[in-house]
Image (cartoon, grey):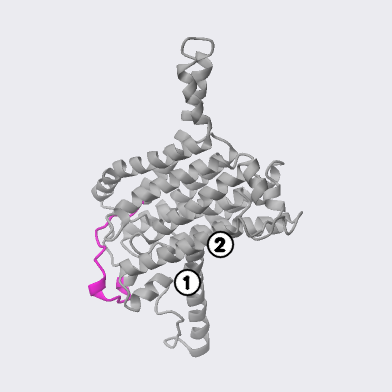
Amino acid sequence: MIFYLSQWLQEQAAGTAWADPLSALRVFRYITVRTAGAAISALILSLWLGPLVIAWLKGLKFGQEYLDRAQQAGTMDNQVFTKKGVPGMGGILIVLVVDLTALMWAQWNAFIVLTLVSLLVLAALGFYDDYKKLTEQKSTGGATESLKLVVQFVLAGFIAWTLWLMPETSKLISEIQVPFFKNAVLTDAAWLGGLITVCAIVGSSNAVNITDGLDGLAIGCTLIVTTVFLVFTYIAGNAILARYLFVPFVPGAGELTVFCAAMIGASLGFLWFNCHPAQVFMGDTGSLALGGVLGIMAVLIHQPFVLVIAGGVFVVEIVSVMIQRYWFKYTRRKYGVGNERRVFLMAPLHHHFQRLGWYESQVVARFYILCIVCAVLALATLKLR
């Protein structure tokens, strides 16, 4: 909006006495200026709207009145602040701020529209899940797993199909890019590219959702990973830098840098209220949406495998759940009901460390450190090609 308004004002002032004073508005053509503006605006909006949204959620009685999974499983009581009464659905704040900020600062193109629409679709899915949980007051309630997967797969399939159909983006699907290699490792492999696209979006959405179990954990790790993609989207949208670093140049991808900045500002603002002890939880409304758009942005800049590296914490979290679940089912079949075995004391992995006696704040801080290490490794792939 600001970009288009500045352009319109300059056009109207052309040939008049206002032309020279308004020439300063040309700075809004630069992605770097709009990126900074998006980050600052999103942070300010989050800090301003945060107390209002929290009060609104409390007024609607959307607080969590049931014990969370860690407390139900018997995590040491002296290490856990009770989370009963803390409002969920805080993802509404993040999604609202990201949408408003991106619309305000980005130059609208197909990538921005696709990302914003996907954000809203996944947020709506998460909202439905949160609403059922909070109204039923059951930690195991909410939308069925099959419903969530169907919506996620349909959305991811639609994105893959749309990108493949458009001539200017078809290579994002038909060519397979792998970190540490300068050129595509496979071409004319649309079937494999489509599969990778779907897995990246669905996997990322669910991985962030699973990680959202401790105060500040998911939003902090999302913030770190988004910072990596702030760098990658800027490079992918800049022909000179992309050529120098042997990164696929994707025209229009630079505007995703503005979107990343909006996510960073919104995440910082939300973390202000979500840090331990949390005043609000993002819920599935936020985690499904944020995870999904991370996957989408990775696909749009032709770097889905970079997300696996940068989001290493998310990968480990979802893998821990898969290992636990399938090993539990296997041992139940082999040894019978009541003799099931577990690999971890509790899954996802962050609860395993709580059961080992780590304080919640320790788990979160140490996972942040691991996430930063993963982010550095992801950035290192820019030169190791």
Query: Which residue occupies 34% across, 53% down?
Result: 271
Image location of residue 8, percent across then percent down: 51, 20
Which residue was labeled with disc 1? Answer: 321
**Is residue 242 depicted above or below 5 in this figure?**
below
Marks 1 and 2 sit apart, C-alpha to C-alpha, by 17 Å
Magenta segment's dominant SS is loop
**Is residue 83 left or right of 199 when viewed as pictured?**
left
Q: Residue furthest right?
A: 188
Looking at the image, residue 286 lies above or below residue 342: above
Q: Is residue 33 above or below residue 25?
A: below
Q: Would you say 81 lies left or right of 207 here?
A: left
Dividing the picture into quarters, in which one does residue 256 lie? top right
Mark nearer the N terminus (1 vs 2): 2
Can you identify the residue that label 2 sits on?
Answer: 308
How far from the left and from the top, in percent, is residue 280? 30, 54
Asked if the magenta segment contains residue 84, the reply would be yes
What's the residue at 76%, 55% (across, down)? 187
Does residue 342 lie above or below 252 as drawn? below
What residue span does the magenta drawing correspond to?
71-90
Which SS class for mark 1?
helix
Q: Quadrant of residue 223?
A: bottom left
Task: Determine the secondary structure under disc 2.
Answer: helix
Front-most of residues 38 and 208: 38
Q: Position of residue 160 (x, y in %)?
A: 64, 50
The residue depicted at 45 percent of the width and 82 percent of the height is: 342
